[in-house]
Amino acid sequence: MTTSSIRRQMKNIVNNYSEAEIKVREATSNDPWGPSSSLMTEVADLTYNVVAFSEIMSMVWRRLNDHGKNWRHVYKALTLLDYLIKTGSERVAQQCRENIFAIQTLKDFQYVDRDGKDQGVNVREKAKQLVALLKDEERLKAERAQALKTKERMAQVATGMGSSQLTFGRGSSQPNLSTSYSEQEHGKAGGSPASYHGCE
């Protein structure tokens, strides 16, 4: 166990972070490797829960507001956001579109490390890709459809079931968690950049 992961676990306890927040913090850590696809899948699945959605998005926006030597927080938050937009609740893309300015500002992100390497270029490029995806409704629909097909294939491989036995979406034996949330009943989802006023 690395020093950074021990420090992160201590902060998780001290700040009483929820399971969803802890998963986002782990996926967007300063460790020099990317978030695992299994961890991002867990976070994406949690976006269908109203409370977890708010916690996830709040932590993602917090990470996107980081800077300097914590450039990995920002880059990994963009990577996670890209994954969530394609595979998570549609509310992720909706909230990102409502707050697209927060992502657009990252197209100017600057950070040069001690060795003179421009690490900000990774953030700038990822921000450009994400903004382009959010502005292209047709491409976003296609990406979400492709992600669902991939998820179905992976589920079939994992369970060893035939395609006739496994279905997703309408007619599925799985509950449709995306209908468990109603903005009319609960107001607008929290966790947007406008609702966040602090740093980690």
Image (tube, rainbow, N blue to C red):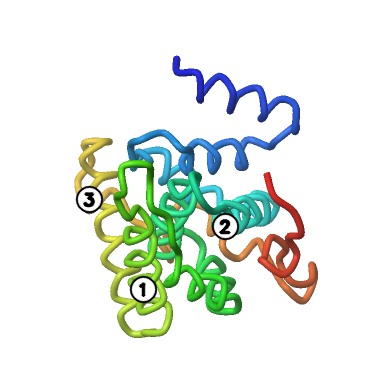
Crowd tier of the residue under label 1, counting other residues whose Cα lies within 10 Å: few below 14, some 14–19, many 20 or above: some
Please give left or right for residue 94 compared with residue 171 in the image: right
Q: Position of residue 136 (x, y in %)?
A: 36, 84
Tag 3–tag 1 contact (CB < 8 Å) = no
Q: For the residue labelled by badge 2, is the local secondary structure a helix, a strand or a loop? A: helix
The residue that label 1 is drawn on is 128
Instruction: Pick the residue in front: 175 or 85.
Output: 85
Q: Which of marks 3 and 1 is in front?
A: 1
Picture quarter containing residue 13?
top right
Q: Can you tell which mark lies on residue 141?
A: none
Q: Image quadrant for the N terminus? A: top left
Whichever of callouts 3 and 1 sits on the residue coming sooner in the sequence is 1
Crowd tier of the residue under label 3, counting other residues whose Cα lies within 10 Å: few below 14, some 14–19, many 20 or above: some
Picture quarter containing residue 142?
bottom left
Please give left or right for residue 28 compared with residue 123 in the image: right
The residue that label 3 is drawn on is 153
Q: For the residue labelled by badge 1, is the local secondary structure a helix, a strand or a loop? A: helix
Whichever of callouts 2 and 3 sits on the residue coming sooner in the sequence is 3
